[in-house]
Amino acid sequence: MTGTGTLVLAGTPIGDTADAPPRLAAELERADVVAAEDTRRLRRLTQALGVHTTGRVVSYFEGNESARTPELVEELAQGARVLLVTDAGMPSVSDPGYRLVAAAVERGLRITAVPGPSAVLTALALSGLPVDRFCFEGFLPRKAGERLGRLREVAGERRTLVYFEAPHRLAATLEAMAEVFGADRRAAVCRELTKTYEEVRRDGLGELAAWAAEGVRGEITVVVEGAPEAGPADLDDAELVRRVRDREEAGERRKEAIAAVAAEAGLPKRQVFDAVVAAKNAERNGPK
């Protein structure tokens, strides 16, 4: 191998192996090194596709990502074609890959991709919710307090939100979403996408939380409708104060929290500031 190599990020099926892009098979056979999140899953995939890897296969997962990245970068620098695949979907999207891409960029190495299936885009398209603007939030924190804090950070987000979640935490997550976003906020729970038991459940967050309490299995993607646009008349001072406090509890400084709430509500910052000060004075003075 001579000259500069190439890092290839390849999408893999999220369920049905027939969804594998044709170029994936060619890249699996061509690569000098195949870095796989799970080498056993890779073996099953190559068998399903009827291809044989001729390059060296190495594991590249969360536990060894930091240690293995420099090794792969050096191979790239020496001219190797390194193919990166994860268990499902595109590398780097809530999966290993970001560190390797960042390191390759820093060294000025060539990077390309084999586009493939994406649970984020598939769930978004199936949700029935607005798709013109959206943001991907990945997995929420496992601890209840941190999870609520993260949700409060995006309570006023008007774009459609997309999350990944483990089945055993789905009910708790939907309950937290219903608490922060409102039980009537529309959402879709997409389960086992492209697989035999694919299911898309569309309802308000409260109803979905009650459904999930009975137990849900499989790979889960949750799509949540963005916050409705609130006019100045829709929010009284108590609600403005509550939103500021929610942001403060999530770690924002008061000045930034006031500015964010004012922007969400379409109000002057001074009006929100005055409401917060008045509430603080009322608490200090107490009932008379």
Image (cartoon, rainbow, N blue to C red):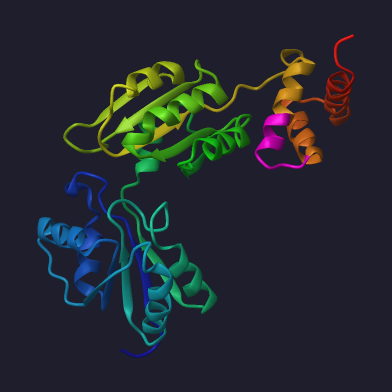
**3, above or below 125, in the image:** below
As for residue 62 lying within the magenta part, the answer is no
Residue 84, image x and y in percent? 32, 66
| Of residues 22 and 267, the one drawn nearer to the viewer in this rendering | 267
Residue ID at (81%, 25%): 267
As for residue 246 lying within the magenta part, the answer is yes
Residue bounds of the magenta highlight: 245-253
Q: Quadrant of the C terminus?
A: top right
Left or right: 163 in relation to 155:
left
| Of residues 205 and 188, the one drawn nearer to the viewer in this rendering | 205
| Of residues 161 and 50, the one drawn nearer to the viewer in this rendering | 161
Left or right: 204 in relation to 197:
right
Residue ID at (36%, 85%): 79
Left or right: 62 in relation to 246:
left
Q: Quadrant of residue 263?
A: top right
Q: Quadrant of the N terminus?
A: bottom left
| Of residues 139 and 160, the one drawn nearer to the viewer in this rendering | 139
Residue 108, image x and y in percent? 51, 78
Residue 14, image x and y in percent? 27, 46
Residue ID at (85%, 28%): 268
**272, above or below 61, in the image:** above
- The single residue placed furthest to the bottom in the displayed view is 2
- The single residue placed furthest to the top in the displayed view is 288
Residue ID at (12%, 69%): 52
Q: Quadrant of residue 270?
A: top right
Residue 203, image x and y in percent? 40, 18
